[in-house]
Amino acid sequence: MRKRKKILLGIVTVLIIGFLIPQNLEMPVKEATKSDYNSKSFWFYPWGKSVTHKGVDIFAKKGTEINSSTSGLVLYAGEINVGGKVVVVVGPKWRIHYYAHLNELNTSLFSFVSKESKIGTVGASGNAVGKSPHLHYSILTIIPYLWRMDSDKQGWKKMFYLNPIEYFEKNKK
């Protein structure tokens, strides 16, 4: 019984710490500006096989440096069919930051990253092959934001995605 209490206390402590660390997101693509992405691309419908665009595409020259937008722990750095070369970081507030279509990966599984950490470079891997080089960046939350649901296609999924563009514009230097 004591072991269960210790484990439960540990889990609760980790969860609380995750919510207390400030997020303060920054633009992940080095030197990118508002003109490098479409401010209306989040939750754009229709969008290919995924039906709805659940992030933002930030266009840049192939090989441009990508830094983590926040401090966190790398949960995955590898290759998948749709996203190509991807990096997945869990950051403050237990939010999952998904970086896709990279040309190079410059981080590894279970690495700690900060806003200064280079995690990769802009590319066109996965289903972006043949398209302009860009970073697809999404923020997912494990705690659903029920008020964000809407009645459009895949609207129920919207409660698990946050609009990165709002954070870029709010945290502009």
Image (cartoon, grey):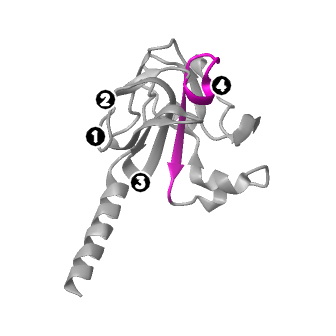
Q: What is the distance, in whole Å, between disc 4 and disc 1 at their CAs? A: 31 Å
Q: Which of marks 2 and 4 is nearer the N terminus?
A: 4
Whether residues under marks 1 and 2 lie with C-beta atoms below 8 angstroms apart, the answer is: yes
- Residue that carries the numbered disc 2 in the rendered image: 117
- Residue that carries the numbered disc 3 in the rendered image: 94
Question: Dot 1, crowdedness within 10 Å: few (<14), some or many (≥20)?
Answer: some
Question: Dot 4, crowdedness within 10 Å: few (<14), some or many (≥20)?
Answer: few
- Residue that carries the numbered disc 1 in the rendered image: 111
Instruction: Identify residue type, mark 3.
Output: Trp
Q: Which of marks 4 and 3 is nearer the N terminus?
A: 4
SS of the residue under disc 3? helix
Regarding residue 172, the answer to whether it shows in the image is yes
Instruction: Identify residue type, mark 4.
Output: Asn
Whether residues under marks 3 and 2 lie with C-beta atoms below 8 angstroms apart, the answer is: no
Q: Earlier in the sequence, mark 3 or mark 2?
A: 3
Figure quadrant of the C terminus: top left
Left or right placement of residue 101 versus residue 155 in this view: left
Q: What stretch is highlighted in magenta?
A: 125-142
User: In front: 114, or 82?
Assistant: 82
Q: What is the distance, in whole Å, between disc 2 and disc 4 at their CAs? A: 25 Å
Residue 51 placement: quadrant? top right
Question: Dot 2, crowdedness within 10 Å: few (<14), some or many (≥20)?
Answer: some
Which residue lies at the image location 55% right of the left edge and 34% below the top edge?
Answer: 83
SS of the residue under disc 2? loop
- Residue that carries the numbered disc 4 in the rendered image: 38
Nearer to us: label 2 or label 4: 2
Instruction: Identify residue type, mark 1.
Output: Ser
